[in-house]
Image (cartoon, rainbow, N blue to C red):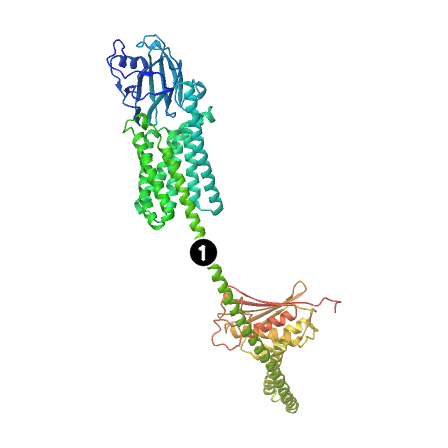
């Protein structure tokens, strides 16, 4: 029936409360748009009296309009309905909801006939008439007497308003069902979040991290959107609601875009990839829009971008369905269902369709539930496939490793046989060499002794005449003796059965003798000796030590620049004899110093200079036998320093 108020020409049908426990407000509301957002209640009452309110066909759906709405409705209860009626308005995230309720029998066109109730999510919960996830106002209604209600609604978010009148018992039951349903949804989200977080911690795949963060943002946003925070933490809900809702939406866009980039890695084209990266920025702007106050302008863009992402990912999931049918099917269904849910929700939030009682639902929540469950199944399937492939790869790798180990074992056995043969051959060669040198030494020493004796006789007979020629011949014979000594010492070092015979030797004698020998052997080369030794003595075999120092001096004169001298420095330092042979060269590569003491190793720059690569190896062997060391230093100016170090005899200890 129509309301008959004097001076009012039009209004919606009165809502009669009779035998039912609950009645929808849809179809019983008039609406007036307030473009200035400054209209007062008396002005709205005047506009109502002049018939400027229009009848709503369903519920209010204003979208993101920058204006306020005034809504009028009339309630009248019969004897069958309870005296106390509970008016419930939703959704519970509208910023400002103010209700003006007519006192019984008062003048409906007088502002003073109405009491004012402040609601909205910016009003502290303890100031509301009833603590509830939605906006609830108890109404005392007298039977068969109409009561006028005016509702002003304004919000920076999408403006929509649906309502219902309940009996107290029905509201209690409805609230219980709603809380149980929301708790179940949140519990499922929490379980899936924990599962994906555990998967990430276990296998370190960032795909599971992004998805778990996405579920967490859905969880937090749902708590604020569905009014659960009002029951959990009523003291702060009016302060945190916008941050959780719109900040949560921005965070959802960020982590979902990152998740999509990771999920479809390598599949999106250039522009799709750029769009996903752009949505990362849009999500960030949505989060910061809350404290900066421009989120009414950015949120529609965010929802439109989110819907575009879902359309793009639906297209990509078709390709994934072809490449990986098992996991691709879950992903395709997830994005197909999300596309339907988000499309409807975007159209609703933009206020493009009126909302009747049957369509006053939030499709995002069930779409999110199905989407998250299907994506979780897809990720689980991918994980199972990855584990199977990993197991197959592991078995193949194990088989290959076994074959490789078998091949390497056989190769090592072959190399061992070749090495044993080479060592036996080398040992036989060294033994033959030693025997040969011993034989040659024995055979050479007799004629050399005869030549030496005859030279002594000739020197006696000739007197001073011919001394120079005889001296030259004597040095030649001595050189042959030295060569034989060096060769024999090399042979002795390679024979482990020969033991060393150390004697006490003056350190100065040890140094001077090889220097004098090289001086008359190579008169064209200048050898400079700088020695600060006095009574120091060393313990060792003089022939071996002479061989070591002789080889260093020989190397120095062979490889040094012809016009440069060879300098020898000898001193005692911390109970050690230190001999340094210094020369300038152009035939040494600094990188070769590490292996130049190895047997049969020669420098790459030695060129045509004769040698077998044994000299320095022999020096090191002799020094090791005498508990000494030998090392080389080379600087950028081409100066080479060969340093011998061996312990001095300690007085009083034999």
Q: Is residue 321 visible?
A: yes
Q: Residue at x 51, y 66 (%)?
A: 406
Q: Residue at x 57, y 72 (%)?
A: 616
Q: Secondary structure at mark 1?
A: helix
In the displayed structure, would residue 279 be above or below residue 448? above
- Left or right of 621? Residue 99 is left
Q: Residues within 10 Å of mark 1 (few under 14, many from 20)?
A: few
Count numbered badges in the picture: 1
Look at the image and tell me in which quarter the N terminus lies.
top left
User: Could you say which is closer to the camera, residue 243 or residue 503?
Assistant: 243
Look at the image and tell me in which quarter the C terminus lies.
bottom right
Percent coordinates x, y for residue 221 in the rendering: 41, 32
Q: Which residue is mark 1?
A: 392
User: Extreme left residue here?
Assistant: 9
In the displayed structure, would residue 15 be above or below residue 308? above
Among the 4 quarters of the image, the one containing residue 184 = top left
Percent coordinates x, y for residue 255 in the rendering: 40, 39
User: Could you say which is closer to the camera, residue 520 or residue 44?
Assistant: 44
Percent coordinates x, y for residue 293 in the rendering: 36, 28
Q: Residue at x 36, y 17 (%)?
A: 19
Q: Is residue 132 visible?
A: no
Percent coordinates x, y for residue 77 in the rendering: 35, 14
User: Could you say which is closer to the camera, residue 183 or residue 213?
Assistant: 183
User: Extreme bottom residue here?
Assistant: 461
- Left or right of 611? Residue 70 is left
Among the 4 quarters of the image, the one containing residue 98 = top left
- Left or right of 331? Residue 234 is right
């Amino acid at each position: 029936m129509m309301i008959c108020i004097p001076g009012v020409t039009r209004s919606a049908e009165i809502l009669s409360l009779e035998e039912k426990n609950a009645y929808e407000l849809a179809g019983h509301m008039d609406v007036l748009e307030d473009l200035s957002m400054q209209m007062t209640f008396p002005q709205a009452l005047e506009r109502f009296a002049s018939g400027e309110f229009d009848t709503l066909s369903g519920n209010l759906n204003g979208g993101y309009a920058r204006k306020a709405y005034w809504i009028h409705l009339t309630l009248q209860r019969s004897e069958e309905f309870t005296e106390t009626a509970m008016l419930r308005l939703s959704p519970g995230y509208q910023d400002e909801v103010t209700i003006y309720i007519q006192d019984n029998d008062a003048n409906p066109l007088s502002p003073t006939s109405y009491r004012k109730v402040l609601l909205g999510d910016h009003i502290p919960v303890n100031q509301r008439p009833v603590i509830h996830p939605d906006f609830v106002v108890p109404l005392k209604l007298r039977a068969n007497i109409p009561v006028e209600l005016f509702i002003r609604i304004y919000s920076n978010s999408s403006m929509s308003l649906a309502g219902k009148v309940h009996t107290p018992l029905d509201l209690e039951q409805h609230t219980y069902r709603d809380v149980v349903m929301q708790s179940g949804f949140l519990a499922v989200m929490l379980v899936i979040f924990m599962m994906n977080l555990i998967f990430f911690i276990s296998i370190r795949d960032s795909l599971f991290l992004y998805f778990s963060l996405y579920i967490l943002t859905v969880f937090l946003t749902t708590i604020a959107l569905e009014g659960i925070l009002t029951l959990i933490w009523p003291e702060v809900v009016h302060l945190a609601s916008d941050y959780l809702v719109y900040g949560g939406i921005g965070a959802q866009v960020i982590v979902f875009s990152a998740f999509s980039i990771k999920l479809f890695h390598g599949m999106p084209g250039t522009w799709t990839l750029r769009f996903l990266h752009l949505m990362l920025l849009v999500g960030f702007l949505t989060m910061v829009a809350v404290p900066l106050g421009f989120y009414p302008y950015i949120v529609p863009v965010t929802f439109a971008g989110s819907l575009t992402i879902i359309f793009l990912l639906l297209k990509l999931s078709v390709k994934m369905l072809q490449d990986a049918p098992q996991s691709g099917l879950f992903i395709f269904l997830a994005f197909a269902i999300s596309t339907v849910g988000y499309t409807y929700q975007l159209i609703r939030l933009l206020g493009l369709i009126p909302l009747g009682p049957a369509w006053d639902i939030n499709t995002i929540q069930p779409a999110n539930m199905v989407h998250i469950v299907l994506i979780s199944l897809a990720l689980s399937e991918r994980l199972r496939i990855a584990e199977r492939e990993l197991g197959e790869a592991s078995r193949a790798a194990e088989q290959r490793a076994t074959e490789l180990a078998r091949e390497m074992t056989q190769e090592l056995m072959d190399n061992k046989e070749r090495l044993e043969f080479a060592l036996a051959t080398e040992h036989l060669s060294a033994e033959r060499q030693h025997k040969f040198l011993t034989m040659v030494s024995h055979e050479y020493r007799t004629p050399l002794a005869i030549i030496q004796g005859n030279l002594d006789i000739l020197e006696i007979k000739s007197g001073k005449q011919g001394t120079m020629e005889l001296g030259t011949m004597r040095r030649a014979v001595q050189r042959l003796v030295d060569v034989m000594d060096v060769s024999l010492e090399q042979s002795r070092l390679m024979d482990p059965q020969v033991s060393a015979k150390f004697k006490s030797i003056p350190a100065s004698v040890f140094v001077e003798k090889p220097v004098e020998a090289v001086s008359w052997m190579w008169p064209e080369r200048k050898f400079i000796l700088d020695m600060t030794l006095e009574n120091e003595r060393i313990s060792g075999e003089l022939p071996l030590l002479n061989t070591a120092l002789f080889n260093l001096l020989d190397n120095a004169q062979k490889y040094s620049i012809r016009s440069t001298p060879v300098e020898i420095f000898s001193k005692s330092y911390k109970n050690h004899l230190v001999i340094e042979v210094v020369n300038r060269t152009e035939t040494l590569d600094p990188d070769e110093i590490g292996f130049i003491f190895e047997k049969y190793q020669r420098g790459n720059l030695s060129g045509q200079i004769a040698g077998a690569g044994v000299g320095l190896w022999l020096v090191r062997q002799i020094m090791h036998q005498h508990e000494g060391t030998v090392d080389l230093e080379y600087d950028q100016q081409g100066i080479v320093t060969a340093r011998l170090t061996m312990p001095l005899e300690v007085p009083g200890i034999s």
